[in-house]
Amino acid sequence: MPSLPDIAPLAPSDAAAAPADDILIIEDVFKSFPGVEAVRGFSARIRRQEVVVIMGPSGSGKSTLLRCLNGLEQADSGLIIVDGIPLDDNHAHRLEIRQETGMVFQSFNLFPHLTVLENINLAPMRVRHKSEQEATARSMELLGMVGIADKASSYPAHLSGGQQQRVAIARALAMSPKIMLFDEPTSALDPEMINEVLDVMKDLARAGMTMVVVTHEMGFAREVADRIILMDSGSIVETGTPDTFFTNPREERTRRFLSQIL
């Protein structure tokens, strides 16, 4: 996938005129909790089929930002538009954005009393109103894609961490989202299980899925990302292509961060 250039953020009044290939617009987003300003004036535009990796030290606001993007957290101020739909106080807008935005968390969040197939079928049947036959056909296709079709009748407790995370990815994909958000999806896995999840994510990127990924997996970022954003203290420190970010970072804060993790 070719690298895409950085784009200056839009002013709120210009948001409606965003090019058609800008699927996600984030403008001057702030989010605070008692005593903590988690996200401070974050602005970016993300194109269709672009893979953006967000890095930063613990507590830099990465996970909070992702949760704001699909409405799990409500931003205090700023503008978020997902494929032309503003994330605002309109309940219908928020529901639509959650349907169009898949999210994979650090923990797998599978329902332990449901089989793998039942976990994946649940949302398409209840939210998309798919028949059980339609949902099952799609779920089995996705389980094949992530390499665990033979686990359809298993319960989460009988799966490895890597297998559970692949089920979580398949469950998110079952809703046919336009954007996938990943919040450190390998951080809870044993080292030998990390690659099986990263391989699925690489396949998604190659297939053209728009992805925003919070991760410290440097190899994945180098290979797959179109753009890398470094956050610290809730703000963007630096953004650039993987080549520039890793080999010629502009900011001293970026150089310090890379020296600690490479």
Image (tube, rainbow, N blue to C red):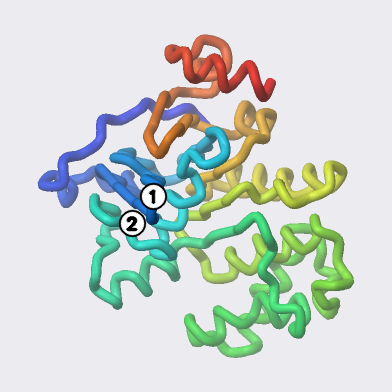
Q: Report the front residue among 131 and 95.
A: 95
| Residue 93 picture location, percent across and down | 29, 71
Quarter of the picture containing the C terminus is top right
Secondary structure state at the residue bearing disc 1: loop
Q: Residue at x 51, y 49 (%)?
A: 63
Per the image, the residue denoted by label 2 is 82
| Residue 77 picture location, percent across and down | 24, 53
Q: Residue at x 40, y 39 (%)?
A: 234
The quarter holding residue 18 reads: top left
Per the image, the residue denoted by label 1 is 35
Instruction: Locate residue 237 relative to residue 75 in the image: left or right.
Output: right
Q: Which of the marked residues, 2 or 1, is nearer the chain's N terminus?
A: 1
Labelled disc at residue 171: none
| Residue 201 picture location, percent across and down | 65, 47
Q: Residue at x 87, y 43 (%)?
A: 192
Secondary structure state at the residue bearing disc 2: strand
The quarter holding residue 86 reads: bottom left
Instruction: Locate residue 15 relative to residue 243 in the image: left or right.
Output: left
